[in-house]
Image (tube, coloured by chain):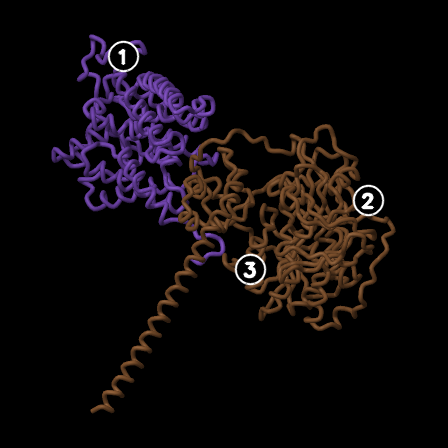
Chain colours: A brown, B purple
Amino acid sequence: MARPSGVQGGLRLDAHKQRSTAHPLRTASPPEHLVLPLDQHAGAAAVPIVAPGDRVLLGQPIAEPGGTVSAWLHSPVSGTVTTIEPRPSPRHHGAPALSVVIANDAMDERHAPAATSSFEHQSAGQLREHLERGGIVGLGGAVFPMSVKVDAAAAHSAPQVLLNGVECEPYISCDDVLMRERAQDVVLGGSILLHAVGAETCIIAVEDDMPEAARALSSAVDRQHDERIQIAIVPRVYPAGGQRQLITTVFGVEVPYDALPTEIGILCQNVATAAAVARWVRDGQPLTSRIVTVTGDGVQHPANLEVRLGTPVSSLIADCGGYTERMTRLIMGGSMMGVALPYDELPVIKSTNCVIAASALDLQPRAAELPCIRCGNCADVCPAILLPQQLHWYVQGRNLEALETYGLMDCIECGCCDYVCPSQIPLAERFREMKPVLLRTRIGRATADASRSAFEARTDRIARLEAAQRAALARKRQAVRDKQS
Amino acid sequence: MRQVLYALVPTVALHVVFFGPGLLVQIILGVATALLCEAAALRLRGKPLPPFLLDGSAIITAVLLALCLPPLAPWWLVVSGVAFAILLAKHLFGGLGANPFNPAMVGYAVLLVSFPARLLQWLPPNVAGFEPVSLSFVDTLTTILTGTPPARFTWDAITSPTPLDALRTDLALGMTMGEAHANALFSAFGGKGWEWINLATLAGGGWLLALRIIRWQIPVAMLTALFVCALIMSAADAGAYAGPLFHLTAGASMLGAFFIATDPVSAATSNRGKLIYGAGIGVLTYIIRTFGGYPDGVAFAVLIMNLAVPLIDRYTIPRIYGHAR
């Protein structure tokens, strides 16, 4: 097992994972109604292919990709489509998104998938086409359609596969539990992805405080007899599991700021995504469920649950014994990057890795914000090697030019700077709010540039045309003059 | 910021051992002025008092400025210096976190430029070889408050230049280093009293480094630059220039390196920038001490480098992840 070097910056945080990993993985009870937002992946929203009143089966496609970067969506139960209408979605802090609502008939009648030969006997192209129909997206949180990345990586001359099992954010343990209990799925997913992109190496990265997961993976690799798959142990530093940070840790290269990892030939997928690939290719089960960590001091019995997409968060809490009286705030995601949920009726979607029912013990008390004294603690922990103290200054002054120079868009919003700030300034939040402003001026500038060059091209063209006409006229006159003389 | 004050305790203690209780009176006057001015400025600016008044920053400004003043300096020097530092150098520029210049050094520079003679009236160190100036605490207090020493003393009898000042005067008179060094103010490698005060400051600064309250870049760069300048010049002409150890332990060298130049608000902010900023202060301190009109140069060196901070910051942005160098 390789032991790569650490990443720049970052924090060693209390993991808060024991509570949820103390018990084995359980299956959440299926709800009566499921709400499935059509935009639960990055890119264009999916387009429904069912109508209210239709009967659907477990695993049956209910929406197709709405663009090149989009994903299929399948029914997690058998039942009836009751309505397709905007419903509050956790991806937008509770703002409504068009959703398919399904009434569960509790029969779990399966949609029969089209029979396929085993993946080794398919060409890489056939396999990639098949992968697209599984509705699988990046389950680490970015929910980027998996097959878009796979296609991009396959176009590279020497691709490599990196499976990300580094679950560095506190409280989240769904990947750890997945690797302990379903290591075989992860490893098989690695083999499938290797074949799909035509790669020769696959590295599964886990943290140095996940000994059980590492053991389970290495015995699964042995059983799989795939020597192209290796396991790398990386130090537990937040945010070592960020895609770019992990690539630097494992391969020792940086991903250029304006490129995606696939452009340098690295297909980085979460271990849960790989396991979903295995279930789709081996068992014909599309992505209709995922593992969710339900934890925090505000819930009776923290656990990791296998949850069908569309299940309301309240139902998960009920499966974990309900809230404790200390419960104060509901968070979707980890303690560093998670977002507060306004209420618990929001559904679990493909990106839901963790639900924290937080008590005051889990929440960092936030004192009143004080002025920045430029101490530089934030710069010491920034994994993107930014100077947050300078960015903060320029955010306050709305100095867009300086924000470009100081790399606002390179901020990965990990929140390390907030965490160490002695003046309690919510830096990452400020940067997140400022990014769209900067982006709009960039677009504005690009539009202005485009219209300017279009105008110049037109002026040029007219000038050339007029010059040609004048020349033709002159030639004609000359010809007339020649005739006359 | 409380730790910064604790880290100054050894310096203050040795200062009192060598120069009497005057510093304590100066600190009390300075801190009282600082808190009053801070409260008044916050009130005028409509800011809440509690988080800012007791954050320690105004107190540190007052203590640093008091440490720069002669122990028996009249009360209005420390009061006007601290008031200038807090009201003009700090709050007129936006208060905590927004001042481009180190407030304590602005206050000190204003006093030094306005009342140079007063600021050079130091006491002889309380060590063997000197007539002890045994002023009681009450004598000290009345001297500071009335501006005149008790009847049995005259100013001439109780004041003495600092080693840096004496050295500058003697060298200007055409003496060699050897002749100047015969002055009882000097010990084997530094100035009597001052060398110990500087070592105590070094210890306090080391403690702040160990606690990671300050970073190593500025002090190390400043002291290295000062050392190297003094080493080169004294190697070139040992008769005309003081050696590196004298410079490191003289005047405000250590106080400047660990407690003044490290003020993050007015210093350069990236790690590379801090090295440049610290080295600049070291070089300028040496130049001003050796060729300038004032015996010590730390205050002006810090202020000049404060001026250069926006430029340094602009050219020392670290390479961002994923960007080519």
Label 1 chain ID: B
Q: How many marks?
A: 3
User: As drawn, is A376 to the left or to the right of A89?
Assistant: left
Amino acid marked by disc 1: Leu
Task: Name the residue: 42% across, 40% down.
Answer: A393
- The crowding category of the residue bearing disc 1, from other C-alpha atoms within 10 Å (few below 14, some 14 to 19, many at least 20), is some
Task: Name the residue: 71% across, 40% down.
Answer: A18
Q: Of the residues tagged 3 and 1, which is closer to the observer?
A: 3
User: As drawn, is A412 to the left or to the right of A93?
Assistant: left
The picture places residue A166, in percent across and down from the top left corner, at 64, 51
The picture places residue A388, in percent across and down from the top left corner, at 47, 43
Question: Which corner quadrant holds the C terminus of chain B?
Answer: bottom left
Label 2 chain ID: A
Marks 3/1: CA–CA distance: 71 Å
> Looking at the picture, do discs 3 and 2 lie on one chain?
yes
> Looking at the picture, do discs 2 and 1 lie on one chain?
no
Question: Which residue is disc 2 drawn over?
Answer: A32
Amino acid marked by disc 2: Glu
Q: Indicate which disc residue A322 carries.
A: none
Marks 2/1: CA–CA distance: 85 Å
Q: Indicate which disc residue B145 carries.
A: 1
Determine the residue located farthest toward the right in the rendered image. A107
The answer to whether residue A275 of the structure is visible from this angle is no
Determine the image quadrant of residue A334.
Answer: top right
Question: Which residue is disc 3 drawn over?
Answer: A260
SS for dot 3: loop
Question: Which corner quadrant holds the N terminus of chain B?
Answer: top left
